[in-house]
Image (tube, rainbow, N blue to C red):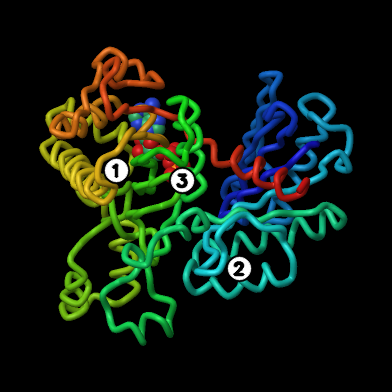
Amino acid sequence: MKILVVNAGSSSVKFNLYESSGEKLLAKGLIERINAPDTRMKYSNHRGQKMEKDITANSSEAAISEACLALMDKKTGVIGNLTEIEGIGHRVVHGGATISGAVRISPAIKQVILDCFSLAPLHNPPNYEGIEACEHLFPNVPMVAAFDTAFHQTMPSSAYTYAIPHDIADKNQIRRYGFHGTSHQFVSVAAAGILGRDLDTLKLITAHLGNGCSITAVNCGKVADTSMGLTPLEGLVMGTRCGDIDPAVVIFLRRLGYSLEEVDRMLNKESGLRGLAGSNDMRDILKAIANGSTAAKLALDVFTHRLVKYIGAYAAVLNGFDALIFTAGVGENVPVVRAMVCAQLTYLGVHLDPALNKANALTISQKGAMPAVLVIPTKEELMIARETLRILTT
Ligand code: ADP
């Protein structure tokens, strides 16, 4: 069964086509800068063929149509026609407090996604548009939505409740939701496989360190706590987001005369690594440090300090842990971040093997050391394909 996974964002669409038997990735692509004069598609297939070209696409539907043409292309395509696609999985960011797993898309589920527009104004609208586009392009193909928030719905109320007046919180659905759930779930399942244990016997700390960063404490397959909150702004230091700050900073900035929009942009787009050292890209930060930049060194120190703090907190929440998992761009590729963090965790029994860490090996802790430290490449799209298959075949 061939399953198409669609991740429709505000200006881009990512697509992955899987053959579900054997979980084989047949082709993947990215269409960037939709509705701009320089829309571009990058595409590759399982035969190693690559294609990159300028296209015209002024909507998600136009972009997904272009993706379909690429998948059927005589030279680089992987299917003869679209009827070969028997299921479509959509990434949706926010499912609110009612969605606790991937679900088949129905009018009621579409309404839930619509109802969450105000909670994820940048993400849910384009996700919804992607679903409607596929309904037009594939009228008879069943579709599934996999939500970034769903895995975190297993969190206890002590972890998701903010200590603000409960009537206001309840009325306005203000609580911790958590994001990157598909990634945290994928690496948790993978870690159980690597450790040769059942997930429901394990205490894990999963650190997703990409442009957006979040960390989750997973107790026996259920989320005990996670760092992102009502929105993806809370928690760790990120590429452009500040993560945790005193909420009074917002009040203070408003009193100084900054508008709501300015504060929003500052904290979401101009803070984090970019705010501290001018770039949201960890590679730039590392280069700048090598060239003697003290601002870049401080940015790295703030980034790792925050991570260490969260790991210590989650070790306490879990009352000890079996494995720490690093994933996503920085987690998978930057040994120095892992080394700096783990050097502060020896009191918990964490001991890295420097050579394995430098090689980005799957297990980077010393042989026999507990907790184990793992580097697991995240595959959110594969997780969505798995969930789509599961829902459409059971
Ligand atoms: P996104 O959240 O956009 O999916 P990614 O998971 O791709 O983000 O992570 C992006 C971050 O990972 C950037 O800070 C980038 O610098 C960093 N990164 C990716 N690959 C490497 C690498 N080989 N070396 C250092 N940093 C890397």
Task: Name the residue at 13% across, 33% down.
Answer: 347
Which quadrant of the structure image shows residue 250?
bottom left
Residue carrying label 2: 113
Mark 3 touching mark 2, by CB under 8 A? no
Amino acid at pointer 3: Gly
For disc 2, the neighbor class at 10 Å (few under 14, some 14 to 19, many from 20) is many
Q: Is residue 251 above or below residue 130?
A: below
Q: Is mark 2 within 8 Å of ligand 1?
A: no
Residue carrying label 3: 221
Task: Name the residue at 58% across, 50% down.
Answer: 12
Which quadrant of the structure image shows residue 300?
top left
Q: How many marks?
A: 3
Q: In this view, does 157 lie above or below 255?
A: above
Q: Which mark, residue 279? A: 1
Depth check, mark 3 against mark 2: the one in front is: 3
Secondary structure of the residue carrying numbered label 1: loop
